[in-house]
Image (cartoon, coloured by chain):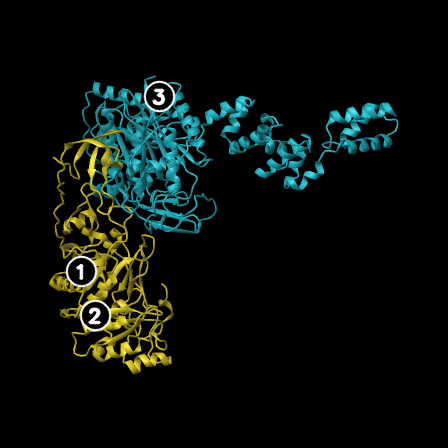
Chain colours: A yellow, B cyan
Amino acid sequence: MKPKAGDKVKITTSDGEFEGIILPRPELLSQDITVLKLKTGYNIGIENKKIKKMIVLEEYKTPVLKAKKLKPKADLPTVAILSTGGTISSRIDYRTGGVYADYSAEDFVAMCPELEEIANIKAAKVMSVMSEDAMASDWVKMAEEVLKVINEVDGVVITHGTDTMHFTSAALSFLLKDLNKPVVITGAQRSIDRGSSDAFMNLICAVTAAAKWDGAGVVVCMHGTMSDEFCNLTRGTKVRKMHTSRRDAFRAINDEPFAKVFTDGKIEVIKEDYAKRNSGKTSLRELEPRVAMVYIYPDMDPGIIDYHLKEKVHGLVIVATALGHVPTNNPKSLIPALQKAAKKIPVMICSQTLYGRVHPYVYANLRKLSMEVGATYLSDMLPEAAYSKLMVALKQKDAKEFMLTNIAGEISSREVDDCFLI
Amino acid sequence: MAKVKCGLEIHQQVDTKKLFCECDSIIHENTPHYTITRKLRAVVGETGEVDIAAAQEALKGKKYEYEAYDDNCCLIELDEEPPRSLRQEALLAGVQVAKLFKAKFVDEVQVMRKTVVDGSNTSGFQRTALVAYDGRIDSSLGKISIPTIIIEEDAARLIKDEPDKTTFRLDRLGIPLLEISTGPDIVSPDHCAEVAEKLGLFLRSTGKVKRGLGTIRQDVNVSIEGGERVEIKGAQDLKLLPKLVELEAVRQQSLIDIKKELEKRNVREVFAQIVDASRLLVNSKSKVIASALSKGGAVLGIKLPCFKGLIGKEVQPGRRLGTEFSDRAKVASGVGGIFHSDELPNYGILPDEVEQIAKHLDCGNHDGFVLVADAKNRAERALQAVLVRANDAIRGVPKEVRRANEDGTTTFMRLMPGAARMYPETDVLPIKITKQMIDSVEIPELIEHKIGRYEKLGLGHDLAELVAKSDRALLFDQFAKSFKALKPAYIAELLMTAERTVKRQFNIEINPADEDFCALLTALEHEEISKESVLEILKEKKSVKEVLNKYRMLSEGELLRELTRIIEESKGMPINALIGKAMGELRGKASGQKIVELLKKLTKSS
């Protein structure tokens, strides 16, 4: 019998005898090593060629997780937790390398017992994708799942990978029309198998917001600082992951967070310009996924625009420099290619500075792009928001008009001093 | 005394940058630049079979404050960035030590996360890796096995521990540590000290380890026959080790005696109901009780059947079984302490109150009881912990991790953790230990060998040991080889005592560089200066090269001229006075012998 990951074995090598549990070897590492967990808890690597004998002492049996049954409490609000994957919902069985726990409501409560005191939890696993793998069709699926439960609960929490959380939060903001309750997206920057994970506080705050916040709309709820003090509740179209690894990576851009949420249930409002919970009917918008986003850089090949046209994209988001420039007066000018594109499909301009607003008329080169080419300048809209909004816009009667209309707070009419680098 | 078995765990800081980041391994005492606050969760792993909810309850409300500096803490210490690769230089120090101990290497080093929820690691775990196994050293009482050689990161420094908040400083977090564990081969308190010292010497022989207070820490595992392995942490001073071992043996023997007595009394298991005794004590004179009740708390109690007289039994000087109950209660719920029946009436609790409580708890003549006054849920948790400890007493010695007190006694820290609290550090790639890597590291000369070698060079034993253990051992080796005309013992004496002697004689603090010693010895070797000038030169507190000229010895011609002048200036002076004057004036510029010789010649001829 060939020993498999999880089995307790005795290995005899030229160096001696080792007893322990066989662990899985990650695929990308060289396969000439057997990893053994010793009785002390330490793992060691043993060269396969040194192994003379290996006998299985005890075969691995999958553990049975016991979760206690939840009893609904009459006086508590109800919150649905939809899990979609990512760090916050991956728990690895280190004996086999497999992912276990499918995140039922019981699993969430077992992981974070405080939730039971905040709300009656309903939970569903919607999908299991790392967010870098998320596709536009996944956004649609999430929106559909929200719509399914929205009328039976007081709020929805979506647990999500953090890489593209801000793409999803924007997409859902446009896909869910007339959202009448909060949809709170949260995740984790540190894995949940460690005592220091940010997942627990993020989840507690997200459930609190879904249960109690008086706003309606899609928001992101993640750590406000490096400390475990509070989470920021930030508009889904004005939030962006601004750090690869810090807990407080999600920042409001050209905006302030709506509120700070604390683990003791307190919600401290910072900026009250949000739609309130209401009894209106929420519905779905559709999207057209064939949209491309092009990042502008010096000396770039204008052929990239032609490529996208050839691939039949239905809309282009140009992430331009500063106020909205592309190379204009040099041998590699993008103007001819964009002119060709704009005749066929909508061409949208936003800025790679992220902060501030694009402007179609300040410089001659800008006028060329706006007036000659006919590109649409998207004010202070974030590129990621513009990307999913254009997908939704393409299913509207007038895509350009839709793009220039403020749908979910993605366009702000005036900028004040306290929104920069906060 | 009962037969002791003990093993050591030495934690030695390695002198490199931090193990998983680019921060310098420096400890600070100045005001930290900023502070962050965190909470920790109970997670699967460290708790093993323990109910997570219960474990979480213990952590609830506890805050950890971390103080940080910009120059030696980065996002990695803050647990805000994944670790970099394990520092090669530190690993090589581990390889070197493993070679010294004749250990076998693992083929591939796997970095592990060891769950730690006392807050001393921002991540909630300590990164640790087994490098080598099955080593050994010799001792006066036989071979000591070294089952594991581990490289790991040091924890944050505890600054302040309050009931709801613990403050740590992050400067120490991440400094590479070598952990050397011995098998249970140590057989007495003195043997323990001997082995600890020897391990320390071995580690220092590598020249790659940090030195000074706090850079080496010894944990000791002690058990006696019929007892259990108890790990004692935090002995900063080697001298404390024998006492720790001795007092732990005493403790285990006392606990075994208590167990036997409980057996005699036929106690198999303690079941106890927590009873509220608050109403009996509403007018209590006890400050602790009055304060708890005034804050809306309660006085809760449990009966311990047939424990009378045993709770007050001393297990270590000044510490009773009741103290062990109290330690558990404090750790479990943060209460200030407990009252137990063997110490009452006392602390403001009156005899008739004791009687009433005993009656209320349904205690018979042989029963004892424990009381806790605090917020109700805290008091409950405290008593549950006491109950667990009381049941342990029936079985004898519990497996525990204990903290060393300054007087050699110990205090409960936590239960002995199992292997379940280790899981892989998936952010760091495993490292193969190749033959090339092992061969690239030389086995350093052991300090013991060095002492022997220096004695052969003519150094006395004490001086030889002093040099061998010092930072200047390498310098001494170079100098002893280069300066053939000088006695090695003289060189050693100079290197070891120069600073101290100048301080004592002239009250001047000096800090000579290696080049200064080199310049001095070169000049001595070529007889350009006299030995008498050496301290004079050093006390100038300047670069030796700069001041050397002033102290250069006179040539024979120059000396003759000087002496002639002195004779002429002091006509009629008796010869002995003349010698005194000349010696005074020409001190350091010529040898005394030469001055006398020439003066005699000159005065005779005139």
**Label 1 amino acid?**
Val
Q: Which chain carries label 2?
A: A
Q: Which chain carries label 1?
A: A
Q: Which chain carries label 3?
A: B
Q: Is residue B226 toward the left or the right of residue B554 in the image?
A: left
Label 3 environment density (alpha carbons within 10 Å; few <14, some 14–19, many ≥20): few
**Label 3 amino acid?**
Lys
Residue located beneath label 2 in the image: A291
* Image mark for residue A156: 1
Where on the picture, by quarter, is residue A39? top left
Q: Which of marks 1 and 3 is in front?
A: 3
**Front-lying residue, B385 or A398:** A398
Residue B309 visible in rendering: no
Q: Is residue B514 toward the left or the right of residue B125 in the image?
A: right
Residue A219 visible in rendering: yes
As drawn, B327 above or below A309: above
